[in-house]
Image (cartoon, helix red, strand yellow):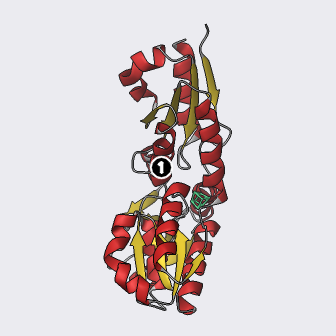
C-alpha cells in the first residue's frame, strides 16, 4: 500500500509569531542605520535567529548597561521593570507582545486588583509566565505559578484561607493541565474564577492534531525542543499514536524503521516553526516512499 503523508492545516507560524517576525524585519528595513536588537530569542528557532542576525538584527541575552537604537520586546512579553530598564539603558523599546499574551497579563492584573489569590498555570521559568507574574505582582503578593497539582500543594493552606481564587493559564498550555488544576482548586477554594487564556491558535492546532493522530500510524511534530507549544503538542499526541518530535529533516534518519513501517503519516508543527523547515521534512518523507 502506498504511504500517505498528510500535513496539518494549522502547522507552523501562528499569527503572533508571524506578526513579530514580519514587524522586526520591517523595522530594520525602515531604519537601516539604527541598531535593532531583540531582547531574548524572537522565536525559539535557530534558523530564524540566524536569518535575523544576517539582516543585522541582534539577539540580546541580557540588557546591557548602555545601548542605543531600538530594542524589541518579543511575543512572550516582559515585565514593566524590564521595559523600564531598557529605557534606562538608552534603547527605544518597541513592544511586539502578542495581543493574546497581553490579554493574559491584563486578566491577571484585573484579578489581582479585585483581591483574588492569583494562580498562573504554566512553567515558572517560561518567559511569558515570568512577565504575567510580574504584572500581577504590581497589585498583589498573592500570586503562585504551578504546572501541576504537586506544585500547588505547598500553598494549600494559604489558598484555603483566601476567600477568592483566580486562575489564568499560559497561552500554550495543555487544556488537561488546566483542567486538573481547576479540579484541585475547586476542592479547596470557596470562590473560583477561571479565565481559560489558552490562545485560539494553540487550541485549534492541538484539536486538529489530535484528530489527525487518531487516523495516523505516526505523527511527526516539527519544531524546536526549546519551544513550549511544540513540546506540549508532541506530549498530547504521544497519548494517541506513535509520535516523534524533530527539529528538522536531518533527524528523520534516526526514525527510519518507524517511518518505513508506517502507512499513514501526519505532519504538524509548532507555532515557531518556519514553513521551509516543514517543507523540507515533507519532501524528504515523500522521497522515501
Ligand atoms: S501561540 Fe498564541 S499567544 Fe503565543 S504568539 Fe502565537 S498566537 Fe500569540
Q: Quadrant of residue 155?
A: bottom left
* Relative image position of residue 236 (x, y in whole percent): 50, 44
Nearer the observer, 19 or 130:
130
Residue 142, can we see it? no
**277 up-or-down from 37: above or below:** above
Task: Please identify the residue farthest to the front as the structure is shown.
Answer: 187
Looking at the rendered image, the quarter that the C terminus falls into is top right
* Relative image position of residue 223 (x, y in whole percent): 48, 42
Nearer the observer, 82 or 201:
201
Nearer the observer, 47 or 166:
166
- Tell me how many marks there are: 1
Task: Please identify the residue farthest to the top as the structure is shown.
Answer: 1
Q: In which quarter of the image is residue 224?
A: top left
**80 up-or-down from 241: above or below:** below
* Residue sitting at x 57%, y 32%: 267
* Residue sitting at x 49%, y 52%: 52
Q: In which quarter of the image is residue 66?
A: bottom left
Nearer the observer, 99 or 125:
125
The residue tagged with tag 1: helix, strand or loop? Answer: helix
Residue tagged 1: 232
**90 up-or-down from 32: above or below:** below
Determine if the C-beta at disc 1 is less than 8 A from ligand 1. no
Residue 224, can we see it? yes
Looking at the rendered image, the quarter that the N terminus falls into is top right
* Residue sitting at x 53%, y 61%: 179
- Ligand 1 resides in the quarter of the picture at bottom right
**How packed is label 1: few (under 14 Cα within 10 Å), some, or many (20 or more)?**
some
* Relative image position of residue 114 (x, y in whole percent): 58, 92
* Relative image position of residue 266 (x, y in whole percent): 58, 29
Amino acid at each position: 500500500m502506498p504511504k500517505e503523508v498528510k500535513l496539518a492545516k494549522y502547522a507552523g507560524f501562528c499569527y503572533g509569531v508571524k506578526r513579530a517576525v514580519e514587524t522586526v524585519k520591517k523595522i530594520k528595513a525602515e531604519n537601516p542605520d539604527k541598531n535593532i536588537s531583540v531582547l531574548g530569542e524572537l522565536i525559539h528557532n535557530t534558523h530564524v535567529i540566524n536569518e535575523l542576525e544576517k539582516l543585522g538584527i541582534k539577539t540580546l541575552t541580557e540588557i546591557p548597561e548602555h545601548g542605543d537604537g531600538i530594542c524589541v520586546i518579543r511575543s512572550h512579553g516582559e515585565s514593566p521593570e524590564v521595559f523600564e530598564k531598557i529605557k534606562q539603558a538608552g534603547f527605544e523599546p518597541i513592544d511586539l507582545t502578542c495581543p493574546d499574551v497581553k490579554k493574559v497579563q491584563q486578566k491577571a492584573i484585573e484579578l489581582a486588583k479585585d483581591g483574588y489569590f492569583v494562580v498562573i498555570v504554566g512553567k515558572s521559568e517560561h518567559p511569558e509566565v515570568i512577565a504575567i507574574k510580574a504584572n500581577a505582582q504590581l497589585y498583589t503578593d498573592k500570586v503562585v505559578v504551578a504546572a501541576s497539582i504537586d506544585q500547588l500543594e505547598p500553598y494549600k493552606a494559604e489558598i484555603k484561607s483566601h476567600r477568592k481564587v483566580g486562575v489564568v493559564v499560559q497561552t500554550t498550555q495543555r487544556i488537561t493541565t488546566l483542567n486538573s488544576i481547576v479540579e484541585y482548586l475547586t476542592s479547596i477554594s470557596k470562590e473560583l474564577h477561571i479565565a481559560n487564556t489558552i490562545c485560539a491558535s494553540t487550541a485549534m492546532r492541538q484539536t486538529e492534531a489530535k484528530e489527525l493522530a487518531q487516523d495516523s500510524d505516526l505523527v511527526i511534530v516539527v519544531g524546536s525542543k526549546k519551544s513550549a507549544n511544540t513540546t506540549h503538542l508532541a506530549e498530547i499526541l504521544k497519548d494517541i499514536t506513535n509520535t516523534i518530535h524533530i527539529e528538522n529533516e536531518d533527524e528523520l534518519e534516526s526514525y527510519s524503521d518507524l517511518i518505513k513501517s508506517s502507512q499513514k503519516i501526519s505532519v504538524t508543527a509548532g507555532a515557531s516553526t518556519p514553513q521551509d523547515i516543514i517543507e523540507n521534512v515533507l519532501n524528504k518523507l515523500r522521497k522515501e516512499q
